[in-house]
Amino acid sequence: MAVYTHLGAEELAELIAEYDVGKLLSAKGIAEGVSNSNWLLETSGADGKATRFILTMYERRIELADLPFFLGLLDHLSAKGGPVPRTIHDRSGNAFRMLDGKAIALIEFLPGVSVGRPTAGQARAVGRALAGIHLASADFAGTRANDLVPKDWQELFDQCGENLGMIDADLPVAVQEHLPELLAHWPTNLPKATIHADLFPDNVLMLGDEVSGLIDFYFACTDMAAYDLAVTHAAWSFGGKNTVFRPEIGAAMIGGYEEIRPLSDAERSAMPLLAQGAAMRFVATRAFDWLDTPDDALVARKDPMDFVKRLRFYAEAGNAPFTAAAS
Amino acid sequence: MAVYTHLGAEELAELIAEYDVGKLLSAKGIAEGVSNSNWLLETSGADGKATRFILTMYERRIELADLPFFLGLLDHLSAKGGPVPRTIHDRSGNAFRMLDGKAIALIEFLPGVSVGRPTAGQARAVGRALAGIHLASADFAGTRANDLVPKDWQELFDQCGENLGMIDADLPVAVQEHLPELLAHWPTNLPKATIHADLFPDNVLMLGDEVSGLIDFYFACTDMAAYDLAVTHAAWSFGGKNTVFRPEIGAAMIGGYEEIRPLSDAERSAMPLLAQGAAMRFVATRAFDWLDTPDDALVARKDPMDFVKRLRFYAEAGNAPFTAAAS
């Protein structure tokens, strides 16, 4: 949570002049994003009406070659009325520009706040919004391979090596216990879509029970729609220090999703495995980042053990957590 | 530059309900402040018109006992039409509340951006605004002693001890050379006011050549008005990696100040010494913070040597840098 790059008012004003958005009225660096810097800007607007934008500078992790996919996806989904910010193109039509060697994009500001402890009504709305994205992306031309599939998790654990047990003695045990099955039986024939792949509460803006924005599509890729639902289920359905399953949340989310895009039988029966995979994916990246982050860094490390507990929950619970609640 | 405390949407909404400002529409942690966390909030407004606020949580350094002074000053100055954000009082009339043991205040949002390399027109506007604050605070009832006067600088250097030379071998030399004179001849009989005492460009919001906001009054205190002008002069008038004096900026600032509040002869002749003191004050706190901040902390350390160079400049330049430019 930081702004990694300082941009002065003069630089921001020069940058804004490349867009048809009026003059700069305000700029605040915002404490969001771990691989990019973000500013909340206000300008006098193309039509004289003050307008807000998010200016994102891509600092690391993001491949420049992927930007047209990420930003094109925002434009595609928002054009279809999805609750997704559109990108503002510059006067030459570019979706992103380079500034000091870094890519920057100007993105629509959406209202809403991220919930901490969702209600069933909110989980249902998120399920609906996620299904809407999966349907709306069906005719999106872009594709991007998921670079966090089971073999990538394996690779991250291999890089952690012996140090994995230093995080928690139970961590390598859980990986050893569950990763082989995920590697062996990971589905390949379920329906694909353009998926968000990281739809935690932080990445959903809500106004009451309504989803006002889905944001931060920088893990978006072409992969199984049901896996995206499993990721979202794993990210939203646990309370009590993030490790106790909240059945009403999971059921509302599945219910909301199926209102818009019913799961096939094959998808439904794959959910327990997909959810274990979703949990393992976050165990892998969190464990890697944990070991990669100095103890005294100001970046808050995320505890991989939260997801070890979710992994074990999904491994034992069977299909029950994925039964839809009626609306 | 960070948000030190996580506040979820639910906590923020509960907090906002204590104020007559409508419902929460948006909340972004902003990357400003080193001793407090700040959020840019939007609410639906008391009258149904969406309104923005800054929510500040005081994390450290600020004495709770000083908050009524700081917040009362904002209210006093804004009531007089000064470009200062007013504080929003809660439904019981409190200017601040406690949340999880920390004080929080809801403060008016002001537009504008902080300039990086000011123009003479901007420096003049800042000089005028500063003088306006000094006049407007004349009937402010609050008082607060300046806790960064020469003996405090001395104490900070004493605490740095031998380590001072590890920052730069020239640092203890400059302190030894100039601090005794400042301690011996620091003026005591110049007109006092409520002063900002830290009016760097970061703490001034501008729209073009106009000052739209003076912010961050958390060093404000009762001290010599001319010292505040000296601090602001030292903070604004140097370019070229912050160490080369820009005479047109200094002259415009003094000119702007004197348009509103002419300096007395005694103030004018004290300016060279006050400016050396202003520079020494930032050498002292930056040196202390430099040694107090781990090398790999994400907080950017500020180089005390920038102000050693300004100190030497002021010690040699006499009265010339304080000659007002006509508007």
Image (spheres, coloured by chain):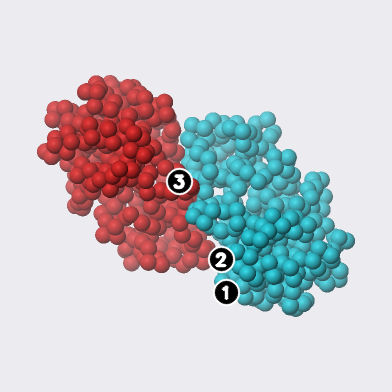
Chain colours: A red, B cyan
Residue B180 visible here: yes
The label on residue B240 is 1
Say which label, 2 or 1, has the lower sequence index.
2
Number of numbered markers: 3
Residue B23, above or below A221: above
Which is in the foreground here, disc 2 or disc 1? 1
Label 3 environment density (alpha carbons within 10 Å; few <14, some 14–19, many ≥20): few
Residue at the extreme right: B189
- Residue at 17 percent of width and 38 percent of height: A183
- Residue at x 51% of width, y 53% of height: B297
Specify the quadrant of the image occupied by residue B125.
bottom right
The residue singled out by tag 3 in the image is A295
**Does the rendering let one see residue A262?**
no
Q: Amino acid at mark 1?
A: Gly
**Residue indicated by mark 2:** B116
Report how far apart the C-alphas of labels 1 and 3 lie in the structure: 37 Å
Residue A308: horizontal and vertical position, in percent?
Answer: 31, 32
> Is circle 2 on the same chain as circle 1?
yes
What x and y, as percent, mark residue B113?
56, 59
Answer whether labels 1 and 3 touch (C-beta < 8 Å).
Answer: no
Label 2 crowd (10 A; few <14 / some 14-19 / many >=20): some
Which chain does the residue under circle 2 lie in? B
- Chain for disc number 1: B
Can you give x and y, in whole percent of width and height, for residue A89 in the image?
Answer: 35, 60
Look at the numbered disc 2 and give the secondary structure of its residue: loop
Q: Nearer the viewer, residue A145 or A139?
A: A145
Between residue B230 and residue A299, name the one nearer to us: A299
Protein chain holding label 3: A
| Co-location on one chain, circles 3 and 2 | no
B194 relative position to A309: left or right: right
